[in-house]
Amino acid sequence: MHHPVLIVGAGLSGLVLARVLHLHDIDTTVLDLDESPTARSQGGMLDLHEDSGQAALRAAGLYDEFRANVHEGGQAMRILDQHAAVHVQGEDDGTGDRPEINRRTLRDLLLNSVPTNTIRWGSKVVSAASLTDGRHEVVLADGTTLTTDLLIGADGAWSKIRPLVSPALPEYLGLSFVESALHNADIQHPESAALIGPGFFFALGEDKGFLAHREPDGGLHVYGALKTDVDWVNRVDRATLADEFLSHFADWDPALRALVADSDEPLIPRQIHGLPIGHRWDRVPGVTLMGDAAHLMSPFAGEGANLAMLDAADLAAALLAHPGDVEKALTVHEEAMFPRAEASAAQSVASLDLCFRADAPHGLIEAFKSFGA
């Protein structure tokens, strides 16, 4: 079966691209390996930046819907040390330019903005290959073979489309997360709710810490962070994960340890990976990448989702500006994407090091003060 435009991945970048092209009567097909849009968690809160994530939503005609779903108070921020002493506290007075929204809410806005037949759920791509006529072939896990004139890889860290343009693979960045969730926090976990406050929260020390935020439903989403070797996540027993993780925090305040110890859901261990800073490739006809597939980085620059959405909006604009000349459009897209992704990836590495250096949290405190926070 042939599809003129095939997008692999129904994440934020794939959906923004499909939405903008739909507004201009260009049909796309989006493949996603999940069986349904609710098959797995979409993560926590996102702060959308005015010049990237918000700009993409304006291009998609969804800015007003986004504003209606912003988490009021979500731009508040606290920085603590391992003894739970507050060093920085910033309130959300409504004037900030990076409003917070739940990732699932944002994804649902995008899903509801494209025709229901746009996305083929349960379509796991196992391989992709270039054909001699400039088209590409995609093979699914069920044996289905699809061809396309324009193939866009928006399929994340372990992209099946990336090998068509680049041999690069994500590298472990030396940091692992243990993700926990505290439900109905004001009632069930009042001490943790008071500790974290209404927005984003850091409690940092050398090589470890806790990051958390309050969600609009009153829950708390927590990431315990630990600099450790690449095998730690696979080596630790899930049944004793909390004890193993918290053994590294024996001298930390009990209120901080409770953010993981009191989780209402099974803990989820995650490794943090990134593609090489400055990852780029030579132009390959008929195929390109967006988002994490193109420039995976740690979350410490706060840019991943924003860049992914901007990639999509810019690619759509390039395709619309150069009708009938896909190669020109892809060249314009990549020439804009590569330098901004390189700058953000470098920032993400520097920020990760800053957060967990020997005198943490003072590096982050100094950084916020330098920006007038």
Image (tube, grey):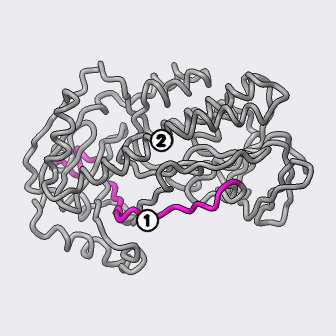
Query: Is 28 above or below relative to 23?
Result: below
Viewed as shown, does residue 80 lie left or right of 64?
left
Question: Which disc number belongs to residue 172?
Answer: 1
Q: Nearer the viewer, residue 5 or 95?
A: 5
- Residue at horizontal 38 percent and vertical 33 percent from the top: 100
| Residues rendered magenta in the picture | 165-190
Is residue 121 or residue 329 the one in the foreground?
Answer: 329
Res 107 quadrant in image: top right
Write the residue at 56% across / 40% down: 338
Question: Element type at marker 1?
Answer: strand
Seen from the viewer's position, the closer of residues 353 and 126 is: 353
Q: Earlier in the sequence, mark 1 or mark 2?
A: 2
Give the Cα distance between marks 1 and 2: 24 Å
Tell me the tag on residue 103: 2
- Whole-percent x and y of residue 30? 73, 45
Residue type at numbered disc 1? Tyr
Crowd tier of the residue under label 1, counting other residues whose Cα lies within 10 Å: few below 14, some 14–19, many 20 or above: some
Q: Is residue 59 left or right of residue 150?
A: left
Q: Quadrant of residue 174?
A: bottom left
* Residue type, label 2: Arg
Check if residue 177 falls in the magenta segment: yes
Residue 40 painted magenta = no
The image position of residue 165, as x and y in percent, is 69, 54
Looking at the image, how many numbered discs can be counted on the residues? 2
Q: Position of residue 74 (x, y in %)?
A: 31, 33
Residue at (62, 25) in percent of width and height: 60
